[in-house]
Image (cartoon, rainbow, N blue to C red):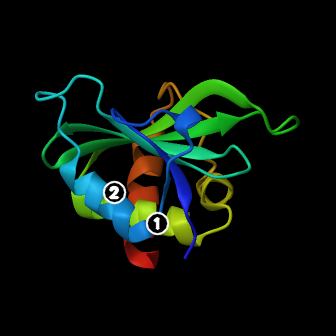
Amino acid sequence: MNQLIIFNFKYKVEDKKLVNLSKSLKILDKTPNSRKYVDNIIGFSKNNGEFIQFLRLYEEDWEFDIPIQNLETKNWTGVTYSLQELPTNIVKKIVKAYFEEKDLIGLIREKFDAGEDPDHTNDNSFVIEKKIISWLYNNY
C-alpha cells in the first residue's frame, strides 16, 4: 500500500512523516474540530508535490481544498477550490481515492472543470461541488 506524507497540527510537511491509508483514516477520526483546536488542517502530499488538505470545522462538517495549478507550468497558483460541508464518510472516501488514484486532482479537474472558479463567483460552482461529491461517493 502506498504511503503519503501527512501534515497536520502535529506534523509539518518538512517532517516527511509517512502514513499508510489505514493510519491516515485513524488520524482523520482523531482530528479535532475548529472549536477545540484552531489550526486543525490535515493534509496529504505525494512525492510529485501534489497535495490535498481538509479543515474540520465541526464533528461532521469538513472543508476539502483542491489546489489549483497553472495548467502550463504545473505550479501551484496559491489558490484552492473548496468543497464545503462534507461529512466524515465523504472525507474518508476522498482520502482513500487519493491514496489509490495516481492523479485524483487531475481527474476531478478534467471531469468537472473544477478550478475555473475558485472564488465561487460563478453561480454554477455550487452545482459543480455537488457533482464532485456525488461522483466521489459513487466511485470510491
Residue at 45% from the left image edge and 34% from the top image edge:
123
Residue at 29% from the left image edge and 54% from the top image edge:
27
Say which quadrant the C terminus sits in: bottom left
Question: Between tags 2 and 1, which lies in front?
Answer: 1
Q: Residues within 10 Å of mark 2 (few under 14, many from 20)?
A: many
Which residue is nearer to you in this view: 98 or 19?
A: 19
Label 2 vs 1, first from the N-terminus: 1
Q: Amino acid at mark 2?
A: Val
- Looking at the image, residue 109 sits to the left or right of residue 94; the answer is right
> Which of the 4 image quadrants contains residue 68?
top right
Tag 1 secondary structure: loop
**Is residue 83 among the parts visible in the rendering?**
no
Q: Which mark is residue 91?
A: 2
Task: Please state the horizontal and vertical placement of residue 77, each as a whole percent of the image.
Answer: 69, 26
Q: Amino acid at mark 1?
A: Asn
Report which residue position mark 1 lands on.
Answer: 20
Which residue is nearer to you in this view: 9 or 101?
A: 9
- Looking at the image, residue 136 sits to the left or right of residue 60; the answer is right
Residue at 43% from the left image edge and 60% from the top image edge:
95
